[in-house]
Amino acid sequence: MVNDFSQIEWKENPGFKGGEGVFYNKMITDGVNKMMQGKLPSGASIGYHKHEGSCEIIFILEGEGTVLYDDEKLSVKAGCCHYCPEGHSHSLINSGSEDLVFYAVVPKQ
């Protein structure tokens, strides 16, 4: 299977999971797993949330940001991969001046 994210329109998600600003995404799901391309403009965030019944893998493509992961605050930039295992909590914040663009996979949602 090949997924072409360039053929999918961006969806606006204001205040996603209690975050700031608007989170944009293009999502593909097979009913069990989610694959998405995401974009956070400068200052926007995905709210802090716990993964129950799934984990999440986020690969940063462009920009820089901050991950709040349990009790840690971690810097991320293009080329970094963040993993949030099941039972753990995280948030993604665009702390840079450019869009933060990433791919994310949530298996077994």
Image (tube, rainbow, N blue to C red):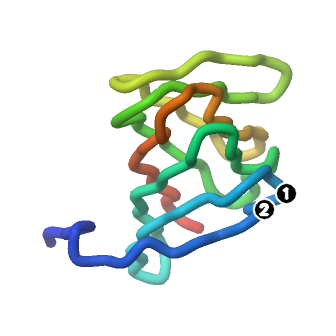
Is mark 2 in CB contact (under 8 Å) with mark 1?
yes
Name the secondary structure under disc 2: loop
> Where 81 falls versus 75 (above or below)?
below
User: Tag 1's secondary structure?
Assistant: helix
Amino acid type, callout 2: Gly
In the rendering, at what x and y percent does residue 79 appear? 34, 24
Q: Position of residue 18 (x, y in %)?
A: 85, 57
Asked if residue 30 lies left or right of residue 58, the reply is left
Which residue is pictured at 48% across the width and 41% down the height?
Answer: 99
In the picture, the quarter occupied by the N terminus is bottom left
Kind of residue at badge 1? Gly
Q: Which residue is mark 1?
A: 18
Q: Residue at x 42, y 44 (%)?
A: 102
Q: Which mark is residue 15?
A: 2
Instruction: Report the residue at 40% width, 37% height from top.
Output: 59
Which quadrant of the view contains residue 52?
A: bottom right
Q: Position of residue 53 (x, y in %)?
A: 69, 60
83 w.r.t. 52: above or below: above
Q: Is residue 54 or residue 79 the one in the foreground?
A: 79
